[in-house]
Each structure stands twice: as structure tokens, then as C-alpha cells.
């Protein structure tokens, strides 16, 4: 396969920015109107993830071996959008029409053949993985909200009971949709280690103008049903075979996966020294500090330190969580989780202070999902 031609032509197309998804979706919905119902009612092309991924993945088909695990997960996960194998040729056609439109005279029959073959390969990996998983797991799980507490301005703790067994690992997250905002999926981290009663906890913070976060915090209530995709992510999961001491730095609801890891260590071991620094702008935003302090009182290996950056009246530690954590760094592995901005600045501080990159693990609460691992 001529992968240079694929990459080069995608590079040209991608230069047209938001026009590309705009054209792609118009072509798809015009040629195959039955696919419109799979997508959210209102679609902002600037937050499009499908078209960018299509061009990127298909033109990198020479790395297919590396991409297979990602594509298998993507294919399995596409079941939650109600996508079936018959939809793949439609998306392939719309992709070709888009390429033809933006490449103009550079679009040749030979290039069309390259793109067709590459797309078919990628689609085959995704559809086969989807088919295999349909024998063992539902396309999505449903979770009934059994507890909904707005704990701080714009922050809610939500507990949902799932309808089927849901095997996941502490530190993972899942893509979640709420009935108030149909077909809009966003990632949220589980704030608990797996439980026998099949319940999961979420910590959700409203982002300004945010569609799903606002619906979850201010609209959802007990009795509502959440749709929950398969668990994903291994950036913050623990290596239980080689337990190392940990420094954890949480910003806002970035606390969620760390609470899960603390619970896992408390219930299953192996024990290790864990120091958790919980950052917030004001003391009111320390929405789960009571529960975390209780865990620390029960477990001598755990220290929890709240750190507040913008609250003159707060009597505890002031500043940024990363700076407080650095004072306690004695060679432990460091985990960081929170907003993109918080994670990037904390990781930069850690590297500056000499923490080896191999000892830093982080996950960012960005609006991008389905990342290539
Ligand atoms: C792996 C992963 C795990 C996550 N876990 C959690 C979690 O446990 N708790 C939690 O509260 N959130 C979490 N998030 C973030 C969450 O997925 C959503 O991005 C967030 O709730 C906003 O969605 P929305 O629909 O409300 O905003 P949108 O309607 O998608 O966006 C509205 C506006 O806000 C901007 N925006 C979107 N997301 C963010 C953000 N996170 N920070 C700043 N600006 C943003 C957008 O660019 C846009 O301008 C996680 C994200 C990832 C990728
Ligand atoms: C090679 C094939 C494909 C690739 C690489 C691909 C890639 C992606 C990616 C990376 C996302 C974002 C992931 C997420 O939000 O969880 C996505 C979302 C989506 N995909 Fe695909 N996809 C493919 C085929 C299809 C097909 C055949 C359909 C059916 C029409 C489809 C429908 C969707 C829908 C409905 C979304 C959600 C869009 C949104 O939230 O705005 N995809 N796709």
C-alpha cells in the first residue's frame, strides 16, 4: 500500500480545518439519511472526533499492528452509538467523497483505490472486534442513579447501580450519556474500586457552557438512567505485582480515580505508602474531603493533604497541590489527574524539579475522547 500517498493526501485535506467535517457529515447524511439518527441532534464540527480520527487512522495504516488494540476497543465501543457493520460502507463512501472534494485534481483512481483498501482494513478490524464482543457484553450498560448530591457549587457526587455485572479496574473511566442529552457521550472516571453491589460513583464538575456536565450536575436526579460504555484506560491503573510508594496530585474532580486507587489498596492491597494531595481553588470546592480524611484515619499508610490556591480565609495549606507534593517527594511514583491546564502545569513543575519522566503518570480531563493509546 502506498502509505506516503495516503498520508500526503490527508495532510492536504486536513488543512481545510472545520470545513472537512462539515462536508463529510453533509455528504453522509445526504447519501445515507438513516445514519443521521446515530449522531447528536446538535453537532459542533469544532469538537468533531470521528472525521479527524478517520483520516488519521486510515492514513496511518502502515502502523496497523500498533493500531489494532486501539481499533478493537474503538470498534467494540462503537456499539454504544448503535453503529452496526452495515454502516461502515456508508462512512467509507462519505470519506471518499470528502477526499475527492478537497483534493480536486490530485484525486486519482489510483489514490481512490489506496484509500478504499486502507479503509476496508481498518473497518474490518473494528467490525470483527464489535462482533466478537457482542457475544459477551452489552453495547452499553444502564445505571440507575440512586444518589445525587451537589456537594459544592457546580460539583456533584453521583452513585448509579448498573443493570449487568460491570468488570472494571480502579483508575479506569467510561464514556457516559444521560437521557436529558441523548447521544452525547463524555468520559467520567469511576471514583470507587469495583463493588459487589454493582454500584459506581462519579464526581462531576460543571464546565462553563458544558452540555453533559451541566445536565449531570443540575438536571439529573435519583431514578434517572445513565448509559455507560465499556471501561477504558490504563494510564492510572496500579501495578499490583511491583507495588511502589505513590504521590498522587488531584485537581478538582481529578480526585475521582485516586479515590478508586486508595479504595483498591485498602481492600485488596498490596499496601504501599500513599500521599494524596487534593488541590482546589477554594475550601468550598473540597467536596469529598470528609470521606478522604476518614479513609486516612482508618489507614495508616495513607496521608491526605488538602491544598487550596485562592482562598484567603482557609486555615490549611495554601498554594498549588504540586508544590506541596514536591516537598514530600522522596523518589515515589507520581500520579497526576485533573483539568488539562492543571495536569500540564503540574507535570512541567515535576519535570523541572527533577522527577524522572518514567515515574510520572497522568490523565487529563479533556473534552477529547477515544484517544489512540
Ligand atoms: C478520560 C477522561 C476522564 C474524565 N473524567 C472526568 C471526571 O471524573 N469528572 C469530570 O467532572 N470530568 C471528567 N472528564 C471531562 C468530561 O469528559 C467532559 O469533558 C466534561 O464534563 C465537559 O463536558 P460537557 O459536555 O459538559 O462540555 P462540552 O459541551 O463538551 O464543552 C463545553 C465547552 O467547555 C470546554 N470543555 C470541555 N471539557 C472541558 C474540561 N474538562 N475542562 C475545561 N473546558 C472544557 C469545551 O471546549 C467547550 O468549549 C474526563 C475526561 C476524560 C477524557
Ligand atoms: C474506520 C472507521 C471509524 C473510525 C476510525 C471511527 C472513529 C471514531 C472516533 C475516534 C470517535 C470518537 C470516540 C468517542 O467519542 O468515543 C467516533 C465517534 C463516533 N462515530 Fe465513529 N469511527 C468509524 C466508523 C464509524 C461508523 C461506520 C459510524 C456509523 C455511522 C460511526 C459513528 C460514530 C458516532 C455516532 C460517533 C459519536 C460522534 C459524536 O459524539 O459527535 N463511526 N468515531
Image (spheres, grey):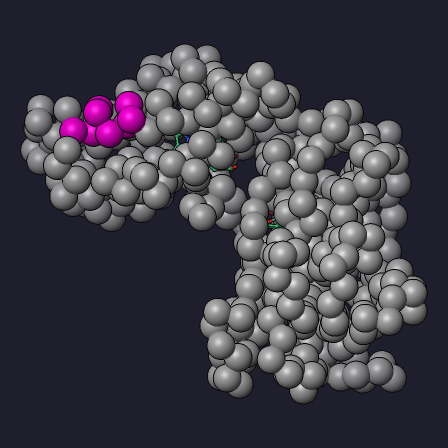
Q: Is residue 167 visible?
A: yes
Q: Main secondary structure of the magenta part?
A: helix
Q: Residue at x 92, y 69 (%)?
A: 297
Position in image of residue 259 (x %, y %):
76, 57
Q: Is residue 207 visible?
A: no
Q: Residue at x 67, y 45 (%)?
A: 169
Position in image of residue 3 (x %, y %):
17, 40
* Front residue of this view, candidates 306 and 194: 194
- Please tell me in which quarter of the rendered image ligand 2 is found: top left
Res 229 quadrant in image: top right
Position in image of residue 13 (x %, y %):
22, 41
Tell whether 350 sits left or right of 152: left
Res 63 quadrant in image: top left
Position in image of residue 92 (x %, y %):
30, 23
Where 122 falls versus 328 (above or below)? above
The answer to whether residue 111 is magenta is: no
Give the magenta part as a residue range.
Answer: 114-121
Residue farthest front in this picture: 241
Q: Residue at x 58, y 16 (%)?
A: 135
Tell whether 186 sits left or right of 131: right
Amino acid at each position: 500500500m502506498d502509505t506516503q500517498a495516503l498520508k500526503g493526501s490527508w495532510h492536504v485535506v486536513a488543512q481545510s480545518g472545520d470545513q472537512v467535517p462539515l462536508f463529510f457529515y453533509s455528504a453522509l447524511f445526504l447519501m445515507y439519511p438513516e445514519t443521521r439518527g446515530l449522531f447528536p441532534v446538535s453537532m459542533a464540527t469544532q469538537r468533531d472526533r470521528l472525521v479527524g480520527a478517520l483520516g488519521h487512522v486510515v492514513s496511518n495504516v502502515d502502523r496497523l499492528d500498533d493500531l489494532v488494540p486501539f481499533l478493537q476497543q474503538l470498534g467494540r465501543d462503537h456499539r454504544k452509538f448503535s453503529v452496526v457493520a452495515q454502516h461502515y460502507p456508508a462512512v467509507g463512501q462519505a470519506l471518499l467523497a470528502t477526499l475527492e472534494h478537497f483534493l480536486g485534481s490530485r484525486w486519482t483512481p489510483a489514490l481512490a483505490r489506496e484509500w478504499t483498501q486502507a479503509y476496508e482494513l481498518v473497518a474490518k478490524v473494528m467490525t470483527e472486534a464489535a462482533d466478537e464482543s457482542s457475544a459477551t457484553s452489552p453495547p452499553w450498560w444502564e445505571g440507575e442513579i440512586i444518589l445525587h448530591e451537589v456537594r459544592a457549587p457546580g460539583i456533584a457526587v453521583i452513585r448509579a447501580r448498573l443493570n449487568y455485572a460491570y468488570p472494571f479496574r480502579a483508575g479506569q473511566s467510561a464514556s457516559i450519556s444521560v437521557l436529558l442529552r441523548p447521544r452525547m457521550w463524555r468520559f467520567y472516571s469511576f471514583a470507587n474500586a469495583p463493588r459487589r453491589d454493582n454500584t459506581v460513583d462519579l464526581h462531576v464538575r460543571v464546565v462553563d457552557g458544558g452540555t453533559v456536565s451541566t445536565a449531570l450536575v443540575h438536571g439529573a436526579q435519583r431514578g434517572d438512567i445513565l448509559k455507560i460504555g465499556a471501561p477504558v484506560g490504563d494510564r492510572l491503573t496500579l501495578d499490583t505485582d511491583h507495588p511502589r510508594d505513590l504521590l498522587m496530585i488531584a485537581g478538582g474532580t481529578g480526585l475521582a480515580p485516586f479515590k478508586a486507587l486508595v479504595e483498591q489498596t485498602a481492600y485488596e492491597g498490596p499496601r504501599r505508602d500513599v500521599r494524596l494531595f487534593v488541590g482546589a481553588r477554594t475550601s468550598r470546592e473540597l467536596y469529598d474531603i470528609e470521606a478522604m480524611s476518614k479513609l486516612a484515619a482508618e489507614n495508616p499508610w495513607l496521608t491526605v493533604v488538602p491544598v487550596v490556591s485562592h482562598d484567603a480565609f482557609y486555615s490549611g495549606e495554601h498554594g498549588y497541590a504540586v508544590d506541596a507534593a514536591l516537598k514530600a517527594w522522596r523518589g515515589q511514583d507520581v500520579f497526576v489527574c485533573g483539568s488539562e491546564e492543571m495536569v500540564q502545569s503540574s507535570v512541567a513543575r515535576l519535570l523541572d524539579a527533577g522527577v524522572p519522566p518514567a515515574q510520572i503518570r497522568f490523565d487529563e480531563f479533556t473534552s477529547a475522547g477515544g484517544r489512540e493509546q
